[in-house]
Image (spheres, rainbow, N blue to C red):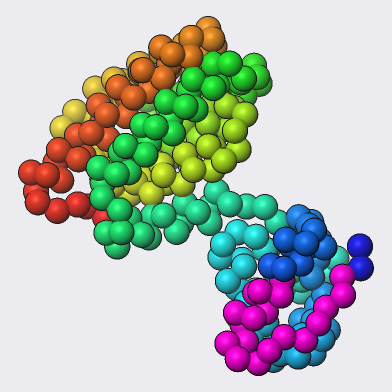
Amino acid sequence: MSVEWQPVRQSRTHELVLESIEQRVFAGELKAGDRLPPERELAPVLGVSRSALREALRVLETIGVLVAQAGRGPDAGARIVRNPDDALGRLLRLHFALGSYRLEDVLEARVVLERSSFAAAAEHASAEDLDEAEALLVRMQEPSVGVAEFNDLDTRFHVQIARSSGNQLTSTLTSAVRESVRPLILRALEAAEDWPATADGLNVEHAELLRLVRAGQGAEAADLAEKHIRGFHGTLVDEKDEGGEAAG
């Protein structure tokens, strides 16, 4: 599809460039997979400097709707993509660290999202989706897995269940919320007095969650998901209350 580009106003130039690109996305003129013209062509057509154009493209890349690759090959240039998970997770993690959201709010958000995810996964998840989740659990149970890798696999397990629920928005929000507390959970895992026992307890609950989803027992899976989240994540809230401030 040929896109007709028009010059933009010069004040707050990069924001106006953003508006121009957004308008074409909203109108359906730009879709995921489409490439933008090279900077040397697009900047004069829009009537802006290449530096202003680059600033706008960096913003779009940060929020996960554009990827830019340098070079002269066929993959070079800026391309419209759909990548909300990483961008939203990064944004939420920064705001959590800045104190924009209370730890208690993050806990409650996780409970609501993951109750929904596990219940829906019990109804909609494919065998392939759940096999991928099980493969993550197998790796989590290996004696050689360290705390950092365990935390990464734990995050991926919860996100995989959300993805298998059939609701992409729930999946994205679950990923973002879980990512926002990843550093905090990692520090808590590292501080566990008996790490092997902590890992074993979490693995038992993960395995039971997966069993319930496979059995189609959505209500039971949702209840256990809430217990699972409040059990460990809830201790972080209690520790914050005792310490008087939230860890970032």
Is residue 56 depicted above or below 106 in this figure? below
Q: Which quadrant would residue 232 be assigned to in this image? A: top left
Instruction: Return the x and y of residue 108 as percentages of the image width and height.
Output: 32, 37
Residue furthest right as drawn: 2
> Which quadrant holds residue 104?
top left
- For residue 229, say whether it is visible: yes
In the rendered structure, the answer to whether residue 27 lies left or right of residue 82 reads: right
- In the image, residue 191 sits, relative to residue 217, either above or below, namely below
Pick the front one: 180 or 206: 180
Image location of residue 28, percent across then percent down? 80, 58
Residue 199: x and y in percent read 31, 26
Residue 16 located within the stretch drawn in magenta? yes
The residue at the point 36 percent across, 17 percent down is 223
Q: Residue at 20% across / 40% down in the picture?
A: 237
Image quadrant for the C terminus? bottom left
Rendered image quadrant of residue 166: top right
Asked whether, in this view, residue 199 is left or right of residue 127, the answer is: left
For the N terminus, which image quadrant? bottom right
Q: Nearer the viewer, residue 26 or 219?
A: 26
Quick one: 199 or 37, which is closer to the camera? Answer: 37
Residue 168 appears at what percent x and percent y? 60, 38
Q: Give the range drawn in magenta.
A: 3-21
In the image, what residue occupies the spot 32% across and 29% down? 229
Asked whether 79 or 222 is in front, the reply is 222
Report whether residue 139 is seen: no
Which residue: 48% across, 14% down?
A: 218
* 84 in the magenta segment: no
